[in-house]
Each structure stands twice: as C-alpha cells, then as structure tokens.
Image (cartoon, grey):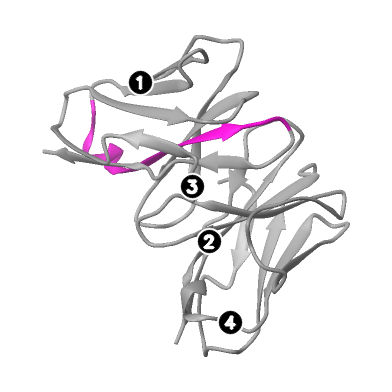
C-alpha cells in the first residue's frame, strides 16, 4: 500500500479527444509528479507540482497540463489526444527529497 | 529519451540464485532509487541510496553506488519466484524529477 490511488485504471479514448486522469495522494505528500510509461520503456517525467504550483516539466507539449489541489489530489489533462499518447500514466507522491510512492497507474489507449 | 540505462535488459535465473542488475546514469544526483514493477502496473519502491553512501542493505537487497563512475548495482540474493518483475533505477536530483532507465526484466525459474 503506497497511499497513492489513481483513477480510472483503464481508459479508451478516440484521437483528438481530451482526457483527465486523477490521482489521490496521502496527507503529507506535498509534491506530486506524473510520468508516462510507454510499453517496454521506463517512465518519462511529464511534470511535477509542489504546493499547487508546477515546479518542473519534462519534454512534453503544452497539451499536457495538470493541477494539484490542497487536499493532495492531482489531475493530469491531455488535450487533442494522439495515438502515441497511448501509455501507462503514473502518479507519484512524496515529501521533499525522499522516495516517491507510485499509484497503480492508468492505462490509456487512444484509438 | 531515457537518460539512464540498465544492464542487462533481461535476466533469467533459477530460483535460489543471486541476481545482479546494473544501472548507469548521466546527471548529478542527490540519490539513486530502485523500483520494482509487476506486469506493467505501479512502481514499488525498493531502496534509496544517497550520493554520499556507497552501499546499502535491505533484507535480501544490496545496492551499491559509485558516483565517480555514475553507476549503481542491485543484488537480490536467494531469489524467489515472486521476485519476477521489471526493475528500474531512478536518478534523483533533490526536489526535482526522477530519471528512469529502461529497466531490467528479471525472470526467476522454479
């Protein structure tokens, strides 16, 4: 049990649509990060939020956006979905400079 | 693109044997973390070693870190079927992102 839950677990969307993925982290996780993991690859950093402000971003286009809320929940929004966005999306919560605790992920399929 | 690499990409051993996985990274780090992933689901944190540490143990796990070579190794002793999974190293630079390698797929044969 990592204290991080993600919803939904699976999702199928059509190219061009928009999607919102959700993450709930336990109290004290003031930092939340999102990662994209393509099949057979390691996770790639999308962005990170600290106290509701984005404080780091990977090499992802602006159509990937996020929010962090005061109750330690977070969202990842992806607009104008492309086929290559099909992946496992992982959310991780942590306190500063400690290990990250990951949720079980959301498997997004874009058709 | 990945900034770390694990070696080997795949490893198959018999139950009871030891498994060693290596990781190289390119950035300066505050810590190096190892994670396990079963069947493409969430990552489970195994162990964190800080940049000023050289070796760390946790149960059947032993991790080493050589910052001069930008490399780390994970040793799993007395392997079990339940250890079958993908293992990832992740370079941590303080409060910022984790940079993952591509992982080692470990298979333990009964």
Kind of element beneath mark 4: loop
The residue under the point 49% across, 42% down is B44
Q: Indicate which disc, 1 or 3, sits on the residue closer to the N terminus.
A: 3
The reply to whether the C-beta atoms of the residues labelled 1 and 4 are less than 8 Å apart is: no
**Residue picked out by circle 3:** B43
Q: Residues within 10 Å of mark 3 (few under 14, many from 20)?
A: many
Q: Chain of mark 3?
A: B
Kindly report the distance in space between the C-alpha atoms of the residues bearing marks 3 and 2. Answer: 9 Å
Res. A26 in view: no
Kindly report the distance in space between the C-alpha atoms of the residues bearing marks 1 and 3. Answer: 19 Å
Residue A19 is left or right of residue A53, and the answer is left
Q: Which mark is residue B60?
A: 1
Seen in the picture, residue A94 relative to B71 is either above or below; the reply is: below
Kind of element beneath mark 2: loop
Seen in the picture, residue A18 relative to A40 is either above or below; the reply is: below
Q: Residues within 10 Å of mark 2 (few under 14, many from 20)?
A: many
Q: Position of residue B74 (x, y in %)?
A: 37, 24
Kind of element beneath mark 1: loop
Q: Residues within 10 Å of mark 1 (few under 14, many from 20)?
A: few
The residue under the point 22% across, 22% down is B18
Q: Position of residue B110 (x, y in %)?
A: 11, 38
**Residue picked out by circle 4:** A81
Q: Position of residue A89 (x, y in %)?
A: 55, 63
Q: Work out whether residue A16 or residue B49 is closer to the camera in this orientation and state it.
A: A16
The reply to whether the C-beta atoms of the residues labelled 4 and 2 are less than 8 Å apart is: no
Q: Nearer the viewer, mark 1 or mark 3?
A: 3
Q: Nearer the viewer, mark 1 or mark 4?
A: 4
Residue B109 is left or right of residue B20, and the answer is left
**Residue picked out by circle 2:** A105
Residue A21 is left or right of residue B67, and the answer is right
Q: Chain of mark 2?
A: A
Q: Which residues are magenta?
A: B79-94
């Amino acid at each position: 049990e990592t204290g991080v839950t993600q919803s939904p677990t699976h999702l199928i969307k059509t190219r061009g649509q928009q999607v919102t993925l959700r993450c709930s982290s336990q109290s004290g996780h003031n930092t939340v990060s999102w990662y994209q993991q393509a099949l057979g690859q390691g996770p790639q950093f999308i962005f990170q939020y600290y106290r509701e402000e984005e404080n780091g971003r990977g090499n992802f286009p602006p159509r990937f956006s996020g929010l962090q809320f005061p109750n330690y929940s977070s969202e990842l929004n992806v607009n104008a979905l492309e086929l290559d966005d099909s992946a496992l999306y992982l959310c991780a919560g942590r306190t500063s400079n400690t290990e990250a605790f990951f949720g079980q992920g959301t498997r997004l399929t874009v058709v | 693109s990945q900034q770390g690499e694990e070696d080997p990409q795949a490893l198959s051993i018999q139950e009871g044997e030891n498994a060693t996985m290596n990781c190289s990274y390119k950035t300066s780090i505050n810590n190096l973390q190892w994670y396990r992933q079963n069947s493409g689901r969430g990552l489970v944190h195994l162990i964190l070693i800080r940049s000023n540490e050289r070796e760390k143990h946790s149960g059947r796990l032993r991790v080493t870190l050589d910052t001069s070579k930008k490399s780390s190794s994970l040793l799993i002793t007395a392997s079990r079927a339940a250890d079958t999974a993908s293992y990832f190293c992740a370079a941590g630079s303080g409060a910022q992102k984790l940079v993952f390698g591509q992982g080692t797929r470990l298979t333990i044969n009964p």
